[in-house]
Amino acid sequence: MGCALSGTGVDPGKPSPDVNGPGPRTGTDSAPGSGLSSRRLSEAGPSASRPPFPLSEEQKELVQESWKVLHQDIARVGIIMFIRLFETHPECKDVFFLFRDIEDLQQLKMSKELQSHGLRVMSFIEKSVARLAQEDKLEQLAFELGRSHCRYNAPPKYYEYVGVQFIAVVKPILKEKWTPDVEEAWKCLFDYLTRMMKRGYQDAEQRNGVNQASYTKRRVPSVSNSSQNII
């Protein structure tokens, strides 16, 4: 998630670094974070090898109840979250062409683009919380978001940073309502979202590789024939 969660604001022309985690594997693989063959992903989508949903019913309630408080201040949370992200991981700015050259953090805080982007990220979190009782829809939401990140060259290694910074920002807002159980519930949710986004990214990357190979294969015969004619 260290790029634009909505896609907007990410440099689509920047080369994407290597994807973290294990590469695609064939066969059934239910371990969290493991890859799938492009054929099986394209046929079955994110549920082809579904990781176990990590939140208990009690944890879902803790997330939903705390979100009711946080929802009142989502614009500020979004801004502070990204400022902290750029402070702790300045390399994340490399995938944001809108913010890449802004060194002054105070100037970043006033950026309308960053405010809008922060709201889009918070909107994704809000949608995730709303789908806690609909695991299939939550899964698809995160999976598709990961696929869109591939188009904008926003690599998975950044995704987990957002959850860490979100938790750091909301602790002082919730005050005494922030308990170890609430923190664990949010960590579990972000861990799940990150894993599903990585799967979506890997699926899109595999599809792109297949499409590129197919395109190259179609062009090879014409080049070969042309060479033979010249000879």
Image (cartoon, rainbow, N blue to C red):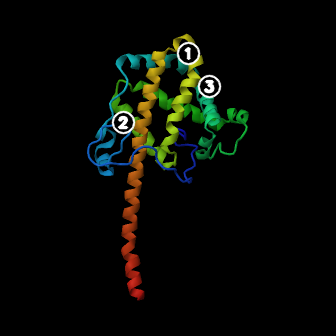
Q: Circle 2 sits on which residue? A: 32
- The earlier-in-sequence mark between 2 and 3 is 2
Residue 101 is situated, as x and y percent measured from the top left of the image, at 69, 45
Q: CA distance from mark 2 to mark 1?
A: 30 Å
Residue at figure coordinates x 42%, y 25% from the top left: 130
Q: Circle 1 sits on which residue? A: 174
Q: CA distance from mark 2 to mark 3?
A: 33 Å
Name the residue furthest front: 22
Residue at figure coordinates x 37%, y 58% from the top left: 210
Left or right, 94 with respect to 27, comes to: right
Q: Circle 3 sits on which residue? A: 76
**Quadrant assignment for the C terminus:** bottom left
State which quadrant residue 176 falls in.
top right
Q: Amino acid at mark 1?
A: Leu
Q: Do callouts 2 and 3 mark residues in contact (Cβ within 8 Å)? A: no
**127 or 56: which is nearer to us?**
56
Vertical relation: 170 (above or below) 106:
above
Mark 2 surroundings within 10 Å by alpha-carbon count, few (fewer than 14), some (14 through 19), many (20 or more): some
Residue 5 at least partly seen: no
Residue 100 is situated, as x and y percent measured from the top left of the image, at 65, 45
Name the mark nearer the viewer: 1 or 3.
1
Vertical relation: 216 (above or below) 210:
below
Name the mark nearer the viewer: 2 or 3.
2
Label 1 element class = helix
Q: Amino acid at mark 2?
A: Pro
Q: CA distance from mark 1 to mark 3?
A: 14 Å
Residue 149 is situated, as x and y percent measured from the top left of the image, at 48, 44
